[in-house]
Image (cartoon, coloured by chain):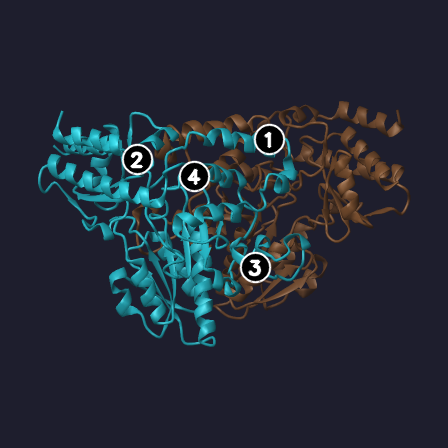
Chain colours: A brown, B cyan
């Protein structure tokens, strides 16, 4: 047995989260794509079956009240809240990340323009390296609020901020490189210029501390099907800081965000609180699968801090194994070495990355390919172990060799 | 046995759709609330379980391709298409009805303004009797496109139309009264003035013929959890007439509507076809529950025409039973008597309707209450029979007597 293999086994034995693995449906595949679609928590199928057979099938319409369907978006939001450093009452779950980016960014621009008496702030800054949908939606938000959109890298944000800046849309972790951006410092810079910060937490929630309340983030969005294991296309969430909620002016004011949704009033009057971020009827099956998936965070010993510690150990170990096994120069990590700048993934630049990932998957190691040249490996500390990491590096070396 | 009871039994025997009832999970309750949440089709739980355990649990990320997840929105749209009189390639499923109203209405206004060279058309007409969310969203669409919003009753639409009208948002069936509006005539009137018609089909799809293609409707939206039995909060759909698709300019241009979604390009380039109406990652569990639920429409003898014929027979019979059993003047039908003006529900105006509905539900007859004074009974021909109808009227009479 190689030294690294033996070290991996020791690390797994010492891992305080190792027992969690049995809470997920896994097989012989080394699954390093939980940053795209989290694995199935083993207790979820029975819960979904109960929602379908009993709540829908037997209680039918009564479930909106008796099974808590109506309030699920805010109740489940309150379960996500501690994972992103938010007190309760500030998160609602529903709609896709893209739709929530639209809500958050338009609302942010409106606040900035209101601050300035309706004029002056007419520019939105967007992370130029963002996952594309955020950029597309930001373009629409800019067009529909009379702003111009200016793509800049997160590093350029401080110097790009100015008296015209209304809002800044940033990613906590870069989806391609895995770089963790400095949320506290960037948020401070945005605030110093009088603008509003909207953070996309898709690649950080459930993997590392976010500290929304602590750092005074204004608005945030995120998906739930990556490190939160909510299932394919499970609904996204929207955070609106408590003191901003009375000013949250949604571009999608559906009946679910009305102060009196069953009053059936022709005039819109927004609800108080995070509920104001809701739109239409929530998709209950997907929502309640997510609700069940979040149970794993209630287990003894599971915390964001524990997850983060293991995540860094896993990515450190992966980089060491890749360094030891893979021929020099064949791949290059584009993920920062510094812990403070690293998310829960490792991205390796590689020629013919698309073809290499195909062969890796055939070899039982599942990551994903991100155009044009990145092999992306996600490490979900709840179910990925150190032996997985060593094996992945070994198979990668063989595939490249 | 009363004469009406006996007649009900004969009607059930003669009903060509009566066998369908066994395809749904029902019990002793007389369920006349399928226009709010359709009953559970009996085969759906096993299908959902397969999606969760096998497609998500075992195939994981591979299911986006191997289980057809990625193309589900347009594939399931094509299954809904014949139910609303649309050729394939014009409907995508996803998001809530509210979100789809926003997409459709903003896109309609943009087309109208483009027709006029960017100016002139700056008014949106909205059904003043609409389900509230459509009105709230229309207000936002107007605000964000520089239009004014003018609520008018459907009857007033022809005289309200003018050179300023950009788009008109109408309901095929009034959610409160059950009135069926004249979609062909109203669409013609809207077109005659050079504006675009957006129809909300929530209370008609799956219950009566719509004829989107035949009547040249421009855009339409609808939910799938009423007469299509897709489950609580199952995703809505968007119809964009084929010849308008190249001009469909979405206010929510998410990565799922990009011509090359996995190209990860910073610049947005819309896909061709109905896919252009997609936004973010689709909620697969809810989508595939709907997919399964639609199977019932493939059964022998099931057609929109057969459903419509039975629906009218059911509502006719209900009105007769109510007339025979309920003391004169205690309730008043606000649903039109004329078949051409009636949806698949009967709405009875009644003092203390909220309290009456509570007692009806206690008596095993489930309809719903719509503020301020309406008892609403929906008749889903796939699983409601004539004996249900007679029983509901009898329990209503006892409740009121």
- Residue A37 locus on image (x, y percent): 63, 39
Closer to the eye: label 3 or 1: 3
**Which badge, 2 or 1, is on the more N-terminal residue?**
2
| Label 1 environment density (alpha carbons within 10 Å; few <14, some 14–19, many ≥20) | some
Q: What's the mark number on residue B16?
A: 2
**Which badge, 4 or 3, is on the more N-terminal residue?**
3
Please indicate, yes or no, whether residue A377 appears anywhere in the rendered image: yes
Q: Chain of mark 3?
A: B
> Real-space Cα distance between discs 3 and 2?
41 Å
Say which element carries label 1.
helix
> Real-space Cα distance between discs 2 and 1?
37 Å
- Residue A321 quadrant: top right
Compare residues B340 and A367 and report the one nearer the observer: B340
| Label 2 environment density (alpha carbons within 10 Å; few <14, some 14–19, many ≥20) | some
**Residue position marked by numbered label 3 in the rendering:** B272
x 76%, y 43%: residue: A357
**Residue position marked by numbered label 4 in the rendering:** B298
x 22%, y 49%: residue: B339
> Real-space Cα distance between discs 2 and 4?
15 Å
Say which element carries label 3.
loop
**Which badge, 1 or 4, is on the more N-terminal residue?**
1
Mark 2 vs mark 4: same chain? yes
Q: What's the mark number on residue B54?
A: 1
- Residue A203 quadrant: top right
x 34%, y 41%: residue: B36
């Amino acid at each position: 047995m190689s030294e690294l293999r033996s070290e991996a086994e020791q690390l797994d034995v010492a891992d305080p989260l190792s027992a969690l693995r049995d809470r997920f449906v896994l097989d012989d595949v080394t699954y390093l794509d939980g940053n795209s679609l989290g694995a199935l928590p083993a207790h979820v199928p029975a819960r979904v079956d109960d929602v379908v057979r009993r709540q829908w099938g037997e209680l039918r319409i009564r479930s909106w009240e008796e099974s808590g369907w109506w309030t699920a978006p805010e109740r489940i939001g309150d379960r996500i809240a501690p994972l992103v450093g938010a007190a309760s009452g500030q998160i609602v779950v529903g709609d896709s990340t893209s739709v929530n980016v639209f809500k958050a960014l338009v609302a942010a621009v409106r606040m900035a323009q209101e601050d300035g008496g309706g004029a002056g702030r007419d520019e939105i800054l967007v992370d130029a390296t963002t996952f594309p949908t955020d950029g597309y939606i930001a373009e629409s938000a800019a067009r529909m609020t009379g702003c111009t959109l200016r793509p800049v890298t997160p590093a350029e944000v401080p110097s790009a901020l100015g008296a015209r800046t209304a809002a800044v849309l940033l990613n906590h972790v870069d989806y391609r490189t895995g770089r963790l951006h400095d949320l506290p410092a960037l948020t401070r810079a945005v605030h110093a210029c009088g603008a509003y910060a909207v953070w996309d937490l898709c690649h950080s929630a459930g993997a590392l501390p976010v500290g929304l309340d602590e750092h005074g983030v204004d608005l945030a969005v995120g998906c739930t099907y990556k490190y939160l294991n909510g299932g394919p296309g499970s609904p996204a969430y929207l955070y609106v800081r408590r003191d901003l909620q009375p000013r949250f002016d949604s571009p999608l004011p559906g009946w679910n965000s009305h102060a009196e949704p069953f009053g059936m009033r022709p005039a819109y009057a927004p609800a108080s609180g995070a509920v104001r971020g809701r739109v239409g009827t929530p998709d209950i099956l997907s929502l309640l699968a997510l609700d069940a998936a979040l149970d794993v965070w209630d287990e003894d010993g599971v915390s964001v801090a524990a997850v983060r510690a293991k995540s860094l150990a896993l990515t450190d170990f992966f980089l060491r194994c890749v360094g030891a096994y893979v021929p020099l120069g064949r791949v290059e990590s584009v993920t920062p070495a510094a812990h403070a700048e690293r998310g829960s993934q490792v991205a390796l630049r590689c020629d013919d990355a698309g073809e290499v990932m195909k062969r890796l998957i055939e070899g039982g190691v599942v990551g994903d390919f991100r155009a044009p040249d990145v092999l992306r490996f996600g490490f979900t500390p709840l179910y990925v172990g150190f032996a997985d990491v060593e094996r992945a590096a070994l198979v990668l070396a063989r595939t490249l060799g």
